[in-house]
Structures are given as C-alpha cells and as structure tokens.
Image (spheres, rainbow, N blue to C red):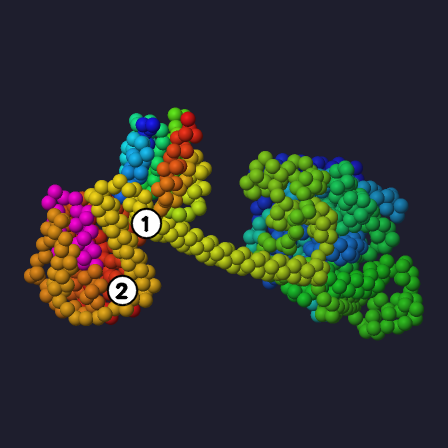
Amino acid sequence: MISVNQLVAVSLVYVAFLFAIAFFAERASVRGRSGWLRSPLVYTLSLSIYCTAWTFYGAVGYAARSGMEFVTIYLGPSLVMIGWWWVLRKLVRIGRAQRATSVADLISARYGKSNLLAIVVTLMAVVGVTPYIALQLQSVTLSVSIFSDPVQTDGLSQSTATFWVACGLAIFTVLFGTRNLNANERHDGVVIAIAVEAVVKLIALLAVGIFVVWGIAGGIGPMLERIDSSPIGEWSMDRSRWVALTALSAAAFLALPRMFQVMVVENDDERHLQIASWAFPLYLMLMSLFVVPIAVIGLDILPPGSNPDLFVLTVPLAEGQGGLATLSFLGGFSSATSMVIVATLALSTMVSNHIVMPIWLSTQAEGAQVSGDVRNVVILARRASILLIIFFGYLYYRLSGGGAALAAIGLISFVGVAQFLPAMLGGIFWRGATRWGALAGLVVGFTVWVFCSLLPSFGPDAVLSASVFDNGIAGMGWLRPQALFGVEGIDPTVHAIVWSITLNMVAFLGVSIVTFPQPLERLQGAQFVNVFDHSAQARGWDAAPATSEDLMVMAQRILGPDDALALFRAEAQRQGVTGHLPEPTQGFLQALERELAGSVGSATAHAMISQLVGGASVSVEDLMAVADESAQILEYSNRLEAKSAELSRTARKLREANEKLTALSVQKDAFLGQISHELRTPMTSIRSFSEILRDTDELEQSEKTKYASIIHGETIRLTRLLDDLLDLSVLENGQVSLNLDTGNLNDVIGQAVLSAGGDRSTRLTVRHEQAGVDRPLTTDLDRLRQVFINLITNAQKYCDAPEPELRIDVMDRGDGLQVVFHDNGTPIPSEARSLIFEKFSRINDKDGSGAGLGLAICREIMARLGGDITHEPRADGNAFVVHLPVRAALAAQ
Amino acid sequence: MGKHVLLVEDETNIIEAIQFLLSREGWQVDTHSDGATAVDKVRNMRPDLVVLDYMLPGKNGIDILTELRADPDFERLPVLMLTARGQSRDRDLAERAGVSRFMTKPFSNTEVVTAVRDLVQLAQ
C-alpha cells in the first residue's frame, strides 16, 4: 500500500518535472529554437485538455452507470474535428487575425468590441466553468482519499484535503500561467507541459486497460465474454440522450474557454489543424478504448457500492499493483491539473481583460496616460482571478456536497458553456447577427441553464426548494426547473440542453433580426464572416490627434518597455524614419491595437486607443458625417481645381493677348518711328536748303543749282516713300484690286528689265535667257512686273561685285513657275536674312535712297498673287526666287 | 573763333546743309557717318562740340552719348542731338543720357547755329 505522503512526494516530483519541462521549453522559445515546441503533435496533444479528470476517471464511472453513453463525450469533439474542421479553421483564422485572447474577447470583438458583451460572456464562463473546476478538485481529492487510511477519510479531512489540493493547483497555475503578460504571446511552457501530461494520462489509462484485459480478464476473448455478461452489455441506447449529449459535447468542445485557449490562442499554424483533425480523434479513441473493460472488471471484482468513478485507481490497487495505481493517479492528476491550469488561465485572462482592466481604467482619470505600469495591474488582476476562480470551484465543491457523479457535474458545465455557441457561430457565419441579439441569446440561454441545470445540481432544498422542483417558481407549474413549460418526462440533462439552446437561439436570431447593427459591428461582422477574403484589414483610426509619444507611453505600460520599443522601432524602420518615433498611421494604430488586444483584450485596447486618438466611438452619424464631409471637401477641391485651371487658362490667354498687344505696340512704335524718320529726313534737307536759298544772298549760281536739285531729289524721294507706304498699306489690308490679264512671263521679265535698266548709270549686267519655259500666265501682270523691277533695282543698288551681274532664269515646277533672280554680290549675312522682307529693313544701304519697303511690298504682292518670294543664299551671291502658280490670281483673295 | 565741331550724321544731304551753315559761322566742321566708330573719332579729334544724329548705322546716338559721358574727358562736352524720330520718348532717353541740347528734324537753320554757339559759350 502506498501512503499519502509517498503519493504527495511523487506528485511533487512530477510537478517539478513539469516545471522543468516548461522552463526549458520557454527558454528554448526565447532563444528562437521553438520549432519542435510548435509541432502539430504538440498541438494535438495540447487539445487533449479536453480530456480532464472527468474523462480520465469519470468515463469509467459513466460507463459503469450508463453503459456506452460515455462515448458521446468523445464522439462530439471527434465529429467536430473530422466533419467541422472548416468551422475550426475559420475560428482559428478569425482568432488569430483579431488577436482574440479568449471566447469573451472573440464575441466582444465580433459585436462591435462591446465590453458589455465581454463582461457577460466572462461572467457566464466563470459560472459555467466553476463546476468543472470543482470536478477536478473532487477527482483529485477522491483519488488521494483512495490511498489514505480509511479511518481518517471523514468528511472534514476530505474537504481539508480538497482545500490543499485547490491551493496547490492555484499556486501551480499562477506560477505556470502568468509569467508572460501577453495572452497572445503564447505560453510555450504551459503548452509543452500539457502535451506531456496528455501523454502521461494516455499511457496511464492504456496501462490500466492493458492490465485489466490481459492481467485480469486473461485476454481479449474472455474480456469480451465478461463484457457481454455484465450489465453494460445489456445497455440499450436512449436516442434522445445520445443525440443531445453528442451535440452538447461538440458544442462544448467549440465553446469551452480552455479549448479556445489551446485551439485558437495557442495555435501557431493553421495547418496544424489538418493533422489534429485526425490525430485528436485518434487520441480520443485510445482514451476510450479500455473504458468499458475497466468498468466491467471494476464492477466484477470490487465490492458492490464502490465508487465506479475511481475504478481506474481501485482496480489496480485491489490487485496489489501499487506502481500501476500510482501511474494511474498521475494520469488523473495530469488530467486535473492541465485542465485547471488552462481553464483558469483562459478565465483569468477574460476576467482581467474584460472586468478588472476596464474598471481600473475607468477609475483612472486619464485612461492610459496615468503613471505606473499597467503590466503590473494586469498581472495582478490575472493572478487574483486565478485564485478567485479556483476558490469558486472549491466553494461549488463544498456547496454541492462533493457527492455527485463526476460525469453529471461535467455535463452541467458543458451545457453552460454551450450557450456561447449561437453567438460564436452566428457571429462568424451570419453578418446579420447583432450585439443585442448575441446579448439576448446569451442571457436567455444562461438563465435557463442556471435554472434548469446549475441550481438543481445542488440538489433539492440546497438553493432551490423542493417545492420549486415539484410546483415551479411561486407555484407556476410551467416554471419547474426540470419540466419547463410543462414539458415533462424528459431526461433532466436533455431537458436543460434543449431548452437552453433553443431559447438561446430563438432570442439570438429574433433580437438580431429586429435590431440594427452599429457601424463598428457591421465592420467587424464583415471581417469575421469574410475572414478568408481579407484577413488583415481592421477598421480604421483617425490618427490625427494621436501622438506617437502618448502611444509609446501606453504601449510601454502594457507591453513592457522592451517589447513596446521593439514594436515602435520596427514600425519606424518600416516607415523609413529609423531613429525616430513612427508616425501614428492608420496601419500602425491598427497593428498597435491588435498588439494591445493581445494583452488586455480587443474592447479595452480599442477603448485605450480611442482615448488617445480622440474618437471615443464610431456611430452611424459620425461615419456619415465623415463620409459627407470628405465628399464635400472632395467636391469643393474638385471645383477649386477646375476653377484654378480655368483661371490659369484665362490668365494664359490674357498673357498671350497682352504679349500680342505689347508686340503690336512695339511694332507700331517702331513703325511710327521708322515712318517719322523716313519722312523727316528728306524734309530736313528740303527745309534746311530752302532756308539757305532764302536767307543767303551771296550764293553762287552753281550752289543755288546744287541746293535746288537736292531739294528736288528729296521731294521725289519723299513722294516715292509716300507711294510705297500707301501701296504697302493697301496690300496689307487686302484692299488691293487685281487687274487680271493673261500674258507671257518672259515678256513681263523683259519689260521689267527695260524699266529698271533704263537708267544706264548702273554697271549691272542683266542676263535673261528667254529659252526654257514659255507659258501663258494669268495674273496681275503690272504687279508682277513691279516685283521684278524691284528685284532688279535692288540688284543694281546692292550688288557689290566688281562686275555685277544678274541672271534671270525661269523654271517650270509643274504646279507653277519659278523665276530666279541670281546676282553675284556678297551673300546677305545669315542674321539679316530673316529681316530683309520686313518693312524699313535696309541692309547695307549706302546712299540711303531706299526706305526699306521694297521687299516688303514684293512679299505682299506675291501673297496676293497666290505665290511667294524667298531668298536663297548661293555660294556666289544671292538668289531671290519668285514662285508663281499658273493661275495665280485665283489663289488670291 | 576757329572752334572744332564734329558732325556725326549719315544722311549726305543733311551733312552738306549743316556743314554749310556752321562753316559760314566760322566753325571748323569735321564729319563722321559711322555710329560704330564715332566715339573713337571724338577721342582722337577732341572737338569743342558734337552734333549727333540719333539714327546711325552701327550704333545709335544715345549709346554713343552714354559712352562719351562715361569718359571723364567728355563729361562736359557739349552735344547737340538731332533726331528725325519725333517721339517724346526719345527726348527723355537723350536727356537721361546727358544730352546738352535736343532738336527734332526738320530744324530751323538759325536755331541750329544759335544752339551751337550758345553751347560752346556755355562750356567755356
């Protein structure tokens, strides 16, 4: 026989071993060598916290009492893992995307980060899980009591033992679970310890099973015979219970806070789910493999009245297998501790994030900007929550008398947490689900559960009087806890399941349909339901008022100085402002919120950032106002832009017009100056010489003649100038009337040569080859002749060759005729070429007789005649080329 | 009096007229018709007075006058400017450049002769 002291010593060694494993795992994790810690195997094993002391001890008891029904507890999760892996995948994806820390956080986040909902879920979870923790305390106490001296196992010492077990578990959990603050910074140590415990409990149960089948029964065949002859073999299936319990365990598997913790929060890789989807059902199958044999043998060999919940221990003990019994004890101990650790961890996160932190924050005037380290508050809150929850479990154990069957207590818990399921699943699959719907469903389901399942579990006259059981509240028959609405004759458990879940769903759906979701709810709803479409985007922040310093201070308090610094540094680097605080961009605020949500929950994180950023909440009006405003601003800016474009267009036009006017004015000034000069110069000579002639008596005749001829010449010059000016003016204004006539081009050239060369004083030789082209031409022949004369006289005046010569050639260009006046003088300098056709431009005008209007007139005439005149520099002189259309006049006007 | 006058003008007939008028009054008149080299001519000749046309080939009268006034030797040299461009803007430009007297063509012979005499007397 093993003494209790030995057992305690073994337990302590085992706990120390777990601590060591957890310690090394966390150290490896810190050093970044955590790959093996995060294998699918560890993930699958960590899911085995589903198998608590209830399943370890209770399944056998369940089988001994109710036959094969215990299978439902394994069937539900297996069905979920195999058939509903896509639901799990979505849950995991959402949980990770939103950095949900708990079931409460997830539901709160889904319904617009509602803290009210988080509080309700937290309270429900605490109440719902409390019987379960009591169950673990009870099983550990019971298992210890088996080993203790039967004389001392009176009630008092048993509850004392339970108290010490509770204290031990509390200390164990606090030490294990609250070393890290960030719930989403996964608990590597805890997970690995749970995995080890999962292995221990599986080995223990298998060992006992193998011992029973081969050691006691003598093989598989005899074992099966004994099963057939036992009461379990005569068990017949109660379909309603079977279905209800399977559904219940499936629901609980999804909704249990501790399952959420290991399945979602501690999940490192979504793909692990794929392996777990077959590996975990396999684990459950192994766990259930020997349940029936152990139950049958226990019923067989142990005295009647033995507690079947302890067969796993008592059968080996009865057979004198102390070592096996100790292993079995460790298996049960593992089941209990792992469940308590994870469950209280999950619950304490919820309590501290959704109840303690918001209260603490609201008592602080400035929210997050108070002095002190929020981390300490959070850790303290978590530790206190753990102690409180385990104390509640102890209290429940004491109140319920510790006598109820393990499985029954477990089922009560299951029904309680299953109330989360409608809000959870509705939230991730139905965008129409609203906060009030979720709240209504939760509250209604919870109330029904408390009334139909929790309170009756204390037994008649404990909380509810026996008369309530029989006659309903205040004598209303339809309010009987086990026959709600007068529906009688149903198994109490099935009754509680059906009514609580049904009413829960009705309330959830009904209220969701009639209420209108808030904007934030809509956004979150869309993100949850369509998580696979967009995993990253969360709702935006208006970052303007948030200063990086404030955010930094807050983040340091919550995440710890080092982590906060690392986060900000990484963001600064990403923004390209290394060495400075990052800008509070939308993306950064969202990331920060998620990061904070990992520590204090999404609603609180949202509230904290709200306080800093300024926009405390987002209502429809706000959103509409923002949208409206931005639309207005956009439109206004568009209008401004259009206006400014129009203005700049107008300004450009004005500028262009002004430039044109200025240019015109300059041209006009220049023109007037030129005209004035051209007119005044001859008049100066005329006036001066006429005064000389008038005032001077002693002039000689030759002088008189000379001066008179100067006057005469200047008068002619003046007249010619006036003629040219008038001519040009008429040509430029297009008022010229052309006298069309048909003639021969060579004749016109000949006449021009004659007219120009009439003055024999020039030395210029004109060569006009009459051969070549001889075409009739219809144009204003007089004007054309004027152009030719002008070109010839220019050559006479300006050709500076020693033997000046002008060659006139006519060429047929098909579409017209070309007359080239080619002289052998100095080519006109290139800078002057563009000017020669301008008015008053005189290049190298030696005698000053020209006003510089000749070529300008020629150009105008040729334009009127539909042709043009150009200058081409030649190597040996200048060529003026006159282009003529065959029917010149038609092109004009 | 035997004073030197430099006439910078490119119109042959006007040169002839002014030369006739001033020679008759006893002035020794030199003529120059190229704007570009007019300043050099003044430097070499050092006349007592310059009659300067406005529009000259190469360099206009205003530029020539400005260049002369920049030289301390010709700061006070009497310059009579004649122009055929009858615009008031030209008179402003000439006065700003430091012209001694500004006359518009066509001029009265008497006025030119009187102006030359007055300017030379004033400069002494």
Q: Which one is in front, A335 or A616?
A: A616
Q: Do the residues labelled 2 and 1 touch (CB within 8 Å)?
A: no
Residue A847 in the image: above or below residue A78: above
Q: Position of residue A664 (x, y in %)?
A: 40, 54
Q: Mark 2 points at which residue?
A: A864
Residue at (84% x, 51% y) in the render: A397
The residue furthest left is: A771
Residue at (67% x, 43% y) in the render: A547
Q: Is A619 positioned to the left or the right of A817 in the image?
A: right
Q: Which one is in front, A236 or A259?
A: A259
Instruction: Give the quarter of the image for residue A770.
Output: bottom left
Q: Distance from label 2 to label 1 (Cα)? A: 33 Å
Q: Mark 1 points at which residue?
A: A683
Residue A436 in the image: above or below residue A843: below
Specify few, some or many for label 1: CA neighbours under 10 Å numbering under 14, 14-19, or 20 or more: many
Kind of residue at disc 2: Arg
Residue A556 in the image: above or below residue A412: above
Q: Which one is in front, A192 or A807?
A: A807
Is the residue at mark 2 from the same chain as the one at mark 1? yes
Q: Quadrant of the C terminus of chain A?
A: bottom left
Which region of the structure is painted magenta? A787-809
| Camera sees residue B110 | yes
Q: Is A512 positioned to the left or the right of B1 in the image?
A: right
| Camera sees residue A154 | no
